[in-house]
């Protein structure tokens, strides 16, 4: 492994050959599985260069050029064919053993079903190919397998032939996908499933068959995914004018999956977590997650599949845009404010952390070792924020004109982020030259705001300064849409608009104030920047009461809480007693009592920022002080408002909707921090619950309050759910998040539980991933045992599933804010990984960046 493996955006060259059509014959037969790939190859350069195909971990059986043997050589990752032909047919036969494939990339087995995952570079584990997104081919795929074991044989597009081989008990299906696509969108599934079928009539009146395939016995849990799919199809027609283009749309839910879901043309493959749901086993949050992921994959059909990426550096072209679209879908269907709050939390808690750590990269990265490492919160979520800023700058109508222009120009092509911005700029007539810098600059811009009020003139002036830096390099000045609402002393909204900030320092002056007004800044998180302004408690309380934007009210509440925590951290380090300002308590009491506020919003306001979110606000952290201060502030607020909380709890407990449940359950969680006396309430909720949201909330409250009932409730829960893997994941996560000194031992013990398996990513993430990313205090134990345990697990996963290992290492490489003792321990763990003899590319890239 070395720097030689780094690929750079600047080195992009068009392919020297292309493949316009491929005919696959996949003979599924356990360890004797065979793939015959017949490709139509054409030369695109005049020079007589060799044809170089990608291939990894492949067993080559034969190569034929125009039906005859030919000259070739093989390396670790390539098949080089020497030929002077310009147009030819290449037949490559490879042998595969899907059962031994634990990486879950390429062709593998999930619980007795064959399935594929080709994004980003998995197709090269199936056959030798030009495995790059700018090579678009039409596919015909023949799948053959045992009929009894694998009654369903699925691939992209439409069925064109079926047949039986009665003597051997085998059958086959032939599929044809009329739309040229890059290899990463190829998919194949073979297995036995329950099938939920429905249909959708498109805006032009075409009848599309919709199919959701789930493991046998789970049919009753597929309805919500189907409903979500139909809503997605309708929404994309209404908001974007985009219609589905094939006669069939399939979703297959599989238990073994590295990520959330995959948008393969006409045949999405989903993690069961984002398909299966019923009230008893799934939480309201799960329902929401399913709707949003089903939407996301569906929306890729246009943004990703019809128009795809030229190269993987352009990943945000499809992912940023599709996340933006799925966020808009959720917001149009549900609460816009609550959805926006969720998106902001991902940015501030995760993306800001990534952008200030060793993996910091622009939304369009410039160099990559392992592409799988760049499916990041930066490319996805900051990418979506960049699209959102364009939407803010252009407005809905011009943005949609830009989308239209984008599709008119690029349908059927593999293009770049620049092509997208060009379409937006030209259709709207807006100058986006400076704006483009968002694509090439890493790091979170800092925006410092200072204000000044002149009582004589009644003038209020805001001075806005921006700067950005990443890996020690200063970036150029950005075009920042900066939303400001100015509230006068009485709370009336005087100004509410988005300003274009384009200079390093810019001033805005407002006239006509009798007294100093309050500015609500960067409303709705109008740009992905860090805002620095010294808000006073009184200003924050003013914004919480009067801001027009619910998101701004929530933001102010987060600030109020955070400032209160940091004040107490300071008190502690000065050896003074902790205290909470009465204005803080009263502001939150006001929220609890405000019957006019959306209950889901109240629940967001009362779900105080996690330790990990607070850490993101500072440049270095005293973790022990933070833990004490945070718990103290929460308990003070909770105990001062317990009567109100209890009253609202009682009132909401009879209402059956997600918002009411969210409020009620946050109230329960707060009460559990106050006193042991609320244990009966927790037990009662657990025993009477008819849905997973309430059951899980009761369990969590029992854990927060460290109530005696906890072990009994955990045992009851396990007895009820031990045969339902996705529910056991919740049980694992809950225990992984326990803030007790023996939690690591308990996790080790749980890895031997019957429901646990190291080969299933959902299990691994729910137990060990949750611990590392979510149990901040115990993962960062001073004795280093949290780091050591994660390292031990990563060493194991490095061999079996490097992609999952690499995603879980994140909390170990983001060490910069911690004290030296902790940093040293984290670096020691990373050095252990660095010295592994068989370190995967995935971990190599992150470990080296972290240590250099
Ligand atoms: N393109 C997928 C999405 O965003 C995500 C994805 C990328 C993926 N690589 C993957 C999913 C590997 C599963 C496995 O929807
Ligand atoms: Zn996506």
Image (tube, rainbow, N blue to C red):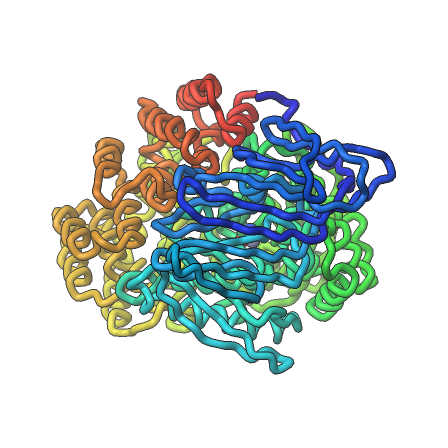
Return the x and y of residue 430 as percentages of the image width and height: 81, 60
Quadrant housing the C terminus:
top right
Q: How many marks?
A: 0
Camera sees residue 512: yes
Return the x and y of residue 349 as percentages of the image width and height: 48, 44
Which residue is depicted at the point 18% across and 60% down?
686
Which residue is depicted at the point 54% across and 42% down?
126
In the rendered view, would you say 434 is above or below 359? below
Left or right: 492, with 147 as reference point: right
Return the x and y of residue 183 as percentages of the image width and height: 62, 49
Q: Nearer the viewer, residue 355 or 250?
A: 250
In the rendered view, would you say 416 is above or below 513? above
In the rendered view, would you say 673 is above or below 694? above
Q: Residue furthest right?
A: 46
Q: Nearer the viewer, residue 480 or 194?
A: 194
Camera sees residue 518: no
Left or right: 377, with 812 as reference point: right
Q: Which quadrant of the view contains residue 761?
A: top left
Q: Which quadrant of the view contains residue 373?
A: top right
Which residue is depicted at the point 52% across and 58% down?
155
Quadrant housing the N terminus:
top right
């Amino acid at each position: 492994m070395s720097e030689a493996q780094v690929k750079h955006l600047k080195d992009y060259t068009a392919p020297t050959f292309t493949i316009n059509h491929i005919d696959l014959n996949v003979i599924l037969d356990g360890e004797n599985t065979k793939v015959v790939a017949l490709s139509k190859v054409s030369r695109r350069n005049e020079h007589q260069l060799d044809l170089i195909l990608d291939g990894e971990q492949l067993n080559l059986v034969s190569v034929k050029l125009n039906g005859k043997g030919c000259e070739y050589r093989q390396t670790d990752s390539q098949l080089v064919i020497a030929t002077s032909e310009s147009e030819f047919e290449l037949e490559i036969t490879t042998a595969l053993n899907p059962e031994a494939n634990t990486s879950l990339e390429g062709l593998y087995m999930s619980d007795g079903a064959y399935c594929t995952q080709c994004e980003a570079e998995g197709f090269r584990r199936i056959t030798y190919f030009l495995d790059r997104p700018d090579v678009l081919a039409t596919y015909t795929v023949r799948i053959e397998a045992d009929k009894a074991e694998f009654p369903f044989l699925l691939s992209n597009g439409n069925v064109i032939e079926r047949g039986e081989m009665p003597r051997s008990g085998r059958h086959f299906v032939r599929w044809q996908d009329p739309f040229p696509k890059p290899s990463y969108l190829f998919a194949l599934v073979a297995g036995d499933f329950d099938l939920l079928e429905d249909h959708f009539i498109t805006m032009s009146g075409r009848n599309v068959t919709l199919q959701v395939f789930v493991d046998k016995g789970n049919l009753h849990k597929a309805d919500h995914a189907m409903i979500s799919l139909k809503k997605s199809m309708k929404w994309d027609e209404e908001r974007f004018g985009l219609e589905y283009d094939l006669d069939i749309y399939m979703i297959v839910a599989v238990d073994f999956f590295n990520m959330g879901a995959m948008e393969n043309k006409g045949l999405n493959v989903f993690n069961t977590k984002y398909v299966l749901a019923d009230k008893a086993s799934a939480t309201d949050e799960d329902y929401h997650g399913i709707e949003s992921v089903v939407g996301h994959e569906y929306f890729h059909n246009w943004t990703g599949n019809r128009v795809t990426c030229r190269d993987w550096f352009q990943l945000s072209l499809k992912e940023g845009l599709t996340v933006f679209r799925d966020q808009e879908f959720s917001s149009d269907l549900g609460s816009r404010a609550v959805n926006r709050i969720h998106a902001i939390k991902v940015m501030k808690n995760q993306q800001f952390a990534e952008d200030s750590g060793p993996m910091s990269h622009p939304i369009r990265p410039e160099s990559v070792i392992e592409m799988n490492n760049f499916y990041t919160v930066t490319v996805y979520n900051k990418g979506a924020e960049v699209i959102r800023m364009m939407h803010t700058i252009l407005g809905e109508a011009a943005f949609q004109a830009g989308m239209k222009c984008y599709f008119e120009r690029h349908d059927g092509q593999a293009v770049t982020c620049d092509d997208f911005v060009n379409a937006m700029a030209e259709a709207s007539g807006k100058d986006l030259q400076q704006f483009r810098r968002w694509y090439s600059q890493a790091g979170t811009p800092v925006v410092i705001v200072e204000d000044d009020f002149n009582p004589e003139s009644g003038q209020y002036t805001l001075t806005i300064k921006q700067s950005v830096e990443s890996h020690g390099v200063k970036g150029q000045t950005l075009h920042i849409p900066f939303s400001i609402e100015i509230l006068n002393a009485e709370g009336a909204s005087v100004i509410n608009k988005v300003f274009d900030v384009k200079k390093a320092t810019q001033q805005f002056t407002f006239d006509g104030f009798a007294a100093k007004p309050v500015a609500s800044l960067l409303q709705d998180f109008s740009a992905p920047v860090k805002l620095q302004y010294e808000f006073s408690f009184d200003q924050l309380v003013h914004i919480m009461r009067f801001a027009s934007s619910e998101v701004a009210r929530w933001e102010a509440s987060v600030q109020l809480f955070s400032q209160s925590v940091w004040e107490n951290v300071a008190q502690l380090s000065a050896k003074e007693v902790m205290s909470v300002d009465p204005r803080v308590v009263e502001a939150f009491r006001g929220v609890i009592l405000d019957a006019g506020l959306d209950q889901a919003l109240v629940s967001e306001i009362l779900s105080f920022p996690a330790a990990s979110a607070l850490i993101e606000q500072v440049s270095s952290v005293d973790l022990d002080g933070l833990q004490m201060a945070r718990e103290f502030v929460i308990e003070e607020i909770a105990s001062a408002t317990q009567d109100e909380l209890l009253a609202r709890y009682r009132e909401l407990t009879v209402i059956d909707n997600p918002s009411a449940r969210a409020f009620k359950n946050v109230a329960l969680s707060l009460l559990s921090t106050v006193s042991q006396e609320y244990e009966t309430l927790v037990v009662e909720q657990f025993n009477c619950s008819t849905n997973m949201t309430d059951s899980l909330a009761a369990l969590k409250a029992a854990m927060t309050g460290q109530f005696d009932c906890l072990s009994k409730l955990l045992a009851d829960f396990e007895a009820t759910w031990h045969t339902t893997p996705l529910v056991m994941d919740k049980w694992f996560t809950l225990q992984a998040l326990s803030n007790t000194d023996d939690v690591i031992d308990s996790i080790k013990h749980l890895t031997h539980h019957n429901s646990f398996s190291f080969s299933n990513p959902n299990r691994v993430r729910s137990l060990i991933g949750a611990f590392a990313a979510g149990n901040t205090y115990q993962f960062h134990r001073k004795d280093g045992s949290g780091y050591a345990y994660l390292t031990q697990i990563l060493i194991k996963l490095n061999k079996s599933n490097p992609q999952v290992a690499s995603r879980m290492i994140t909390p170990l490489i983001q060490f910069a804010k911690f004290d030296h003792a902790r940093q040293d321990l984290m670096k020691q763990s990373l050095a252990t990984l660095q010295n592994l003899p068989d370190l995967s590319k995935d971990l190599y890239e992150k470990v080296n960046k972290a240590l250099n």
